[in-house]
Amino acid sequence: MTDLLTWCSAPARRRPLMRLLVAAQVLYVLGVAGAGYATAAFGQRIVLTTEPIDPRELLTGDFVRLRYNISAAPLRLWHDAAPPRRRQGVFVLLATGPDSVSTAVGVYATAPHPGASQAVLRGWVTDVYRNSLGLRFNLERYYVPDGSPLRQEKVGRTHPLRVRVSIAPWGQARIAGVEEVRAN
């Protein structure tokens, strides 16, 4: 510890290096935050349907754990010569349906080229079953803002949710919003 204090209080020749290190840390934090905002601003928007699993966890605050309609894909959607394996990174090709909800039309080991009204969402394989794949996307947890109707425990358990997701051109995905789907 004293070596660090001695180094920091060293002559002026070390101060530019210290300033450079501090600037690099600040730029890194700003870059991470900026990437999140850029994903929301410039990303391709899709809509997924989901059922909430667990709307409350006391230790980490109020959130809704989500299980998407695309979290379980039929094995027939796998497009690669080698069989899928657990923890393998995958690319899910999504097509927007007439109700504006995206559904999986293919699961690939390498990034496919999406067509019109299609998007690619990165994820990984959690389980491989005889006829299906379990998939995750790092979008399974949504922290509920104050004043949202999703904060009530009963809300969401009986109603499906529509999740608006923004996918950046570089592949990062972010939840843009969550709303309840109520039957009329």
Image (cartoon, helix red, strand yellow):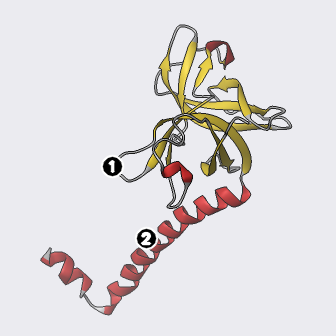
Tag 1: amino acid: Leu
Q: In which quarter of the image is residue 133?
A: top right
For this orientation, the residue located farthest to the top is 130
Residue 27 in percent (x, y) is at 51, 71
Q: Which quarter of the rendering shows the C terminus? A: top right
Q: Which of marks 1 and 2 is nearer the N terminus?
A: 2
Residue 25 is tagged as 2
Mark 1 vs mark 2, foreground winner is: 1
Q: Mark 1 Cα within 10 Å, few/some/many (few <14, many 20+)?
A: few
Q: Which sits in the foreground, 121 or 28?
A: 121
Q: Which sits in the foreground, 125 or 157?
A: 157
Tag 2: amino acid: Gln
Identify the residue at image location x=67%, y=39%: 182
Identify the residue at image location x=48%, y=51%: 151
Q: Is mark 1 on a helix, strand or loop?
A: loop
Q: In which quarter of the image is residue 31?
A: bottom right
Residue bearing mark 1: 58
Q: Left or right: where does residue 147 sit relative to residue 78?
A: left
Q: Mark 2 Cα within 10 Å, few/some/many (few <14, many 20+)?
A: few
Q: Is mark 2 on a helix, strand or loop?
A: helix
